[in-house]
Every structure is written in C-alpha cells, then in structure tokens.
Image (cartoon, rainbow, N blue to C red):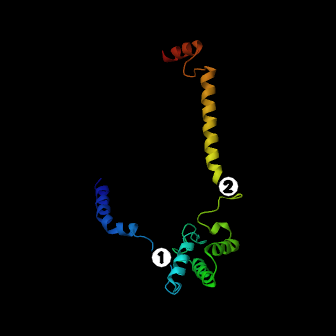
Amino acid sequence: MKLIARLALILALLAPATAPLFLASPALAVQPDEMLKNPKLEARAEEISKGLRCLVCRNEDIDDSDAALAHDLRVLVRKLLVRGDTNQQVVNYIVARYGEYVLLKPNTKGANIILWGAAPAMLILGLAIALYTQRRRRRSGEDRSSLSAEEEKRLAEIMK
C-alpha cells in the first residue's frame, strides 16, 4: 500500500509540471520561406490548407504537418495561387492529383452519399428490428419467466 501511495504522490507532484505539454497547441509547420509576401494570397493559402489532409499524418491538415509531402503540398498550393488560380481550382487540381482522400471534409456527392448515409440507415434498421422483435414477443403471450407444472415439481424435488 505504501508503494501505491508513493506513486500517487509522485504523479500528483508531476501533474502541474507536465500539464503544459498536454495543453500546448500544435505549432504550425509552415516555414517562413514558404510564406507568400502578399498577405491576401497567404491568407487564401492558409484557408485552402485547412481543408487538405496530410497524406502521411492522416488527420492533420498540411499546415500542421512536418512531413515532406505536406511541405510539397503547401508549396504547390502557394505556386498555384501565385499563378492566378482560384481557391476552387487549387483544390480541384490537388484532388485530381491525389484523390478525394486528401480532403479533410469529403464531398457528399456520388458514391460518398452511400458512406454518409450508411451509419444512420444501419442505426434505424437495428432499432426497427429490436422494436419488431420486442413487440412480437409481447404479442405471443409467452411468459418465459414462469415454469410449467412439471418443471416446478422437478425443481421442488431438487431443492429438498
């Protein structure tokens, strides 16, 4: 018991020192040499980057990732903006090159509508099956908790 108390004390003393590590927000991985000099174009690049997934890190946008591929995508986004492309043209170019997986928020069109609707449909189907089964049991009038006369007689013999 003393060991557990000591461990609890150590953890309690270390908690304030380690809390900032868990509460710190992630630093942006965008390097100063990647940033555009035009603040409007840079703001557009950051807006586009928030919607693009790092293909290495999976659930980070490309501005938060230190991966080399994320760096390449950031540079590509900025080159396309400097070239004069609109935000949608930039996103379309990257999606055409890397697939829809690169989008953090996939479209709800075409085959993706099946993915978006499958979970709610399965939930509704499961609830319908459960309600149907429960109602059918009630209607049948079967009382599964009571024993037949023969079963009660056998139970009484066993209990003696």
Q: Count all numbered tags in the image, as a single digit.
A: 2
Left or right of 141, for residue 6: left
x 61%, y 35%: residue: 130
Q: Position of residue 119 (x, y in %)?
A: 62, 49
- 68 lies above or below 4: below
Classed neighbour count for the residue bearing mark 1: other residues with Cα under 10 Å, few (<14), some (14–19), many (≥20): few
Q: Position of residue 22 (x, y in %)?
A: 40, 66
Element carrying mark 2: helix
Tell me the quarter of the picture where residue 127 sits.
top right
Please state which of residues 51 and 143 is positioned toward the viewer in this rendering. 51
Tag shown at residue 123: none
Q: Position of residue 80 (x, y in %)?
A: 63, 81
* Pointers 2 and 1 in contact (C-beta within 8 Å): no
Tell me the quarter of the picture where residue 26 sits.
bottom left
Q: Position of residue 114 (x, y in %)?
A: 68, 53
Looking at the image, tell me whether mark 2 or mark 1 is earlier in sequence order: 1
Q: Amino acid at mark 2?
A: Ile
Q: Which of label 2 and label 1 is nearer to you?
A: 2
x 64%, y 79%: residue: 85
Please state which of residues 150 and 126 is positioned toward the viewer in this rendering. 126
**Mark 2 sits on what residue?**
113
x 48%, y 76%: residue: 28
**Mark 1 sits on what residue?**
28
Q: Amino acid at mark 1?
A: Leu
Tell me the quarter of the picture where residue 87 sits.
bottom right
- 41 lies above or below 58: below
